[in-house]
Amino acid sequence: MSSWPFSSEHEELRAQIRAFVSKELAPHAEEWEEQGDFPDLVFTRLGELGFLGLSYPEEYGGGGGDYLCNIVLAEEMAGCLSGGVAMAVAVQTDMAVPPLYKFGTEEQKKRYLIPAIKGEKIFCLGITEPDAGSDVQNVRTTAVKTEGGWVINGRKIFITNGRRADAMTLVARTDRDAGHQGISLFVVDTDTPGYKVERVLDKVGMRTSDTGEISFTDMFVPDEALLGKEGEGFYNISWELQGERLIGAAGTIAGARRQFEAALAYAKERETFGKPIGKHQVIRHYLADMATEIEAAQQLVYHAAVLVNRGEYPVREISMAKLLTGEVAWKVSDRTLQIFGGHGYAMEMPIQRAWRDTRLIRIGGGTDEVMREIIGRMEGL
């Protein structure tokens, strides 16, 4: 990895995370892939080591670090060789839990944030619905005010950590007629009556990640479940979406670099027609393009991360980073499989898993098409 924009402290953290990932996660990748799941102990261990709260204040059990610490974690989690595990952890660290710190009351932070940082509570994020994917302002899950709390009805889908979660950060509509100003956030315990995991989806990739469809039927939550102010949920979750996109981009391009390194090593060893395949011009050019595109995409991720670290809100740069890393990573994974040939297509090799896992980045957290719309609007179109 490039030293910029990281400090020596970041690199020390990187070494610690890398050692843990290579020793305790990567050796189980095949086993967990076959099972279609991984143990909750992964969260417990990450919490024990302090990796789930790197940028949170020490008073809540966090590490007191900056945002770049989160980028380091996302990059190094790519080394676990399982996109599903890395994504599940990212949901905890950078998607479902941050709103608790930013908008939660002290009581909510004590009850949810501290155990989430310790790995004692696993979180999921309830945004996507069957009829409202990236269109957050048109969610149909409703929260109706009643005495002492809210009654919630609706359905969510494609929820990472959906089966295993202890709590959900939930987006619901509290005013049917107020547009995006009628959306609020809630923090909900998954053992609340009326909360039901309808099914766990069978996916092409990210198979170790439990992705659920959740229903809410007359689910009562108390007033103190409201996260932030009523009607401000759309604005409050907007930053979460940006954080999701950037952390996803960071992990994805780090994974693409690992695939490139595997392809490069194979191209030096595998021989055809009397010489290593890397000496054939077509393969050499493939690898040259991969190296160039990975470097460009990674530097765009770092640029956006530095802006976030300064306290800026770089929607344009984050959208560009997600779009570019998704397309580059998919291209790299496909070319890596091509370079490995039949060996890459065989289930016994990790190449095919990376190829399947990588495809999701162009869909989840906002599709390529949504990213282009955002960028286009920000360019004045």
Image (tube, rainbow, N blue to C red):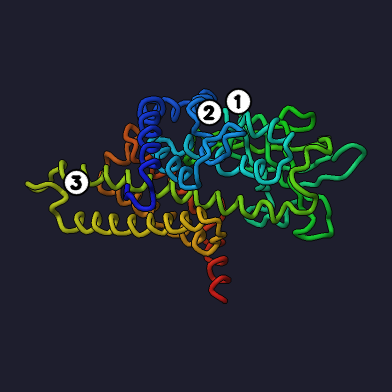
Q: Is residue 101 above or below residue 237?
A: above
Q: Which residue is mark 2?
A: 47
Circles 1 and 2, Cβ within 8 Å, touching? The answer is: yes
Please name which of the two marks, 1 or 3, marks the residue nearer to the observer.
1
- In this rendering, does residue 89 appear at all? no
- Residue 142 percent across, percent down from the top left: 80, 47
* Identity of the residue drawn at 19% across and 55% down: 284
Q: Which residue is mark 1?
A: 120
Instruction: Please tell me whether mark 2 sits on a helix, a strand or a loop.
Output: helix
Camera-nearest residue between 56 and 351: 56
Say whether residue 122 is left or right of residue 176.
left
Q: Residue furthest front?
A: 59
- Real-space CA distance between mark 1 and mark 2, rounded to the nearest whole angstrom: 8 Å
* Identity of the residue drawn at 35% across and 60% down: 296
Q: Which residue is mark 3?
A: 267
- In this rendering, does residue 124 appear at all? yes
Q: Residue furthest bottom?
A: 381
Instruction: Please tell me whether mark 1 sits on a helix, a strand or a loop.
Output: loop
Q: Amino acid at mark 1?
A: Glu
Camera-nearest residue between 29 and 344: 29
> Quadrant of residue 346 in the image?
top left
Q: Amino acid at mark 2?
A: Gly
